[in-house]
Amino acid sequence: MDRIAFRQSWRSCGSWYLYENQKIQDIMMNKVAGILRVKNDGMFIERCIESCIDALDELIVVYNDCTDNSVAEIDKMVARYPNKIKRYEYPHRILGMNITREEYEVAKNLPEGHPSLISTYNNFALGKVTCDYAVKIDADQIYFTEQLKKWCDFVRECKPQKKTLGVIIGKIFSKYISGYWILSTKYGKIVHLLPTWLLRIFYPAYISYAKYLFSYDKAMLGLSGINVLETDETLISAGHSLDGFKSLPSFNGCGDTVIFKMNCNPRFEKFIIPEYNPPYTKMYSVVEAFHLPLKIMYIGYFWKHLSIMRPGLVDKALALHQADDGAYLPSCKFKKIGYSKIVKQASGCIFPLDQKILFQFVYKANKRQLFDSLEKLALRERRKNQEHSDLL
């Protein structure tokens, strides 16, 4: 082959490679990965994954120091969804939640990137993601499938949005929310500047603004959930306490669970929350904070949180429920309580001011969506249980 023919052939092959490579990038573009971390969560894994897997293109499961049936449950789900789920073991001892004072003193002084930090564990999981977008999935959370899928579909189809009148109004309202936050923080209490009627009028515009910012990689989408106790029905925690046992507040998900873009250099860093350590708790914790310098736009409720159902906690929660009929409430009763009363009743639990401020906005804006989602999830789970019973 002469030089001219070789060059033409090389250019042709090069063009083909670039074309095929672009096709591969287009195929992967706007896919969404879930990041699931597991430690002794065997009792939750199947329900959690079944509730979120349809919304995701990929699920990265990392596990560490499991002494229950977690690994077997993970393997079962990998066999069920081999094209979506990837599993990895993290082989290092982690000094994270519920550690001793001595372990706490060690952990808080460890440098970033040390394998014993839970932030490093999370970054290990981040490094396994192959999609353009990701969201953290917690094993003890059962997701509102339709709500999660709706927003993951938006991400998959996301293109730069036009600046409509709704976007402009949403931007103005977002600044109003920021002012509410600043004033509440300044005065150390919730400033009542968010009447329900105001949110019903302007929250749709806020969502339009959220989508607009996200489409230009200028924001993350913040997801929230609700803490529950499961008996023969789903009961929402009111944040009461009994004999030293402090139940969880009603809401969770305060900026730590977001949908984000992977190419924006996301990472987790070591973080210490005063309320997660003595004198507020008996044990110590060094946790992680998600770092991505983008605005968080809060878009509603996405899960019910079953942390209280863990061994060692559920018996105390049930005892509290038996002793205090207002400690855990069915949806039909909880929805009738005003937000101020919810906060006042939760004085005995760990409920930092910044979370109280945030959740007044999130709850009032998404109250209807929350209870609709809980009802749909209950119907979905009853249907699955019936199908399982029929098979037996």
Image (cartoon, rainbow, N blue to C red):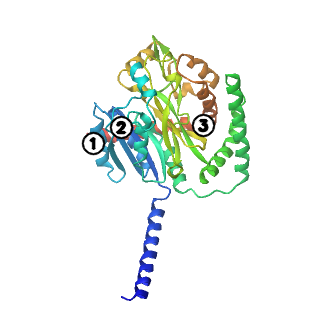
Q: Amino acid at mark 2?
A: Ile
Q: Nearer the viewer, mark 1 or mark 2?
A: 2
Amino acid type at mark 1: Leu
Q: Are marks 3 and 2 in contact (CB under 8 Å)?
A: no
Position of 242 compared to 388: left or right?
Answer: right
| Number of residues whose C-alpha sits closer than 10 Å to that of mark 2, classed few (under 14), some (14–19) or many (20 or more) | many
**Residue 361 visible, this angle:** yes
Q: Which residue is mark 3?
A: 366
Q: In the picture shown, does residue 297 fall above or below 97?
A: below
Residue 5 pos. (x, y %): 41, 87
Q: Residue 319: x percent and y percent?
A: 41, 15
Write the residue at 44% across / 84% down: 8
Q: Nearer the viewer, mark 3 or mark 1?
A: 3
The answer for how far apart the CA atoms under marks 3 and 2 are is 27 Å
Tell me what residue is drawn at x 60 percent, y 31 percent.
359
Q: Are marks 3 and 1 in contact (CB under 8 Å)?
A: no
Q: Earlier in the sequence, mark 3 or mark 2?
A: 2
Can you identify the residue that label 1 sits on?
A: 391
**Is there a contact, CB below 8 Å, between mark 1 and mark 2?**
no
Q: Position of residue 168 (x, y in %)?
A: 73, 49
Spatial separation of the CA atoms under disc 3 and disc 1:
37 Å
Identify the secondary structure beneath mark 3: helix
Callout 1: helix, strand or loop?
Answer: helix
- The residue under the point 50% across, 56% down is 30
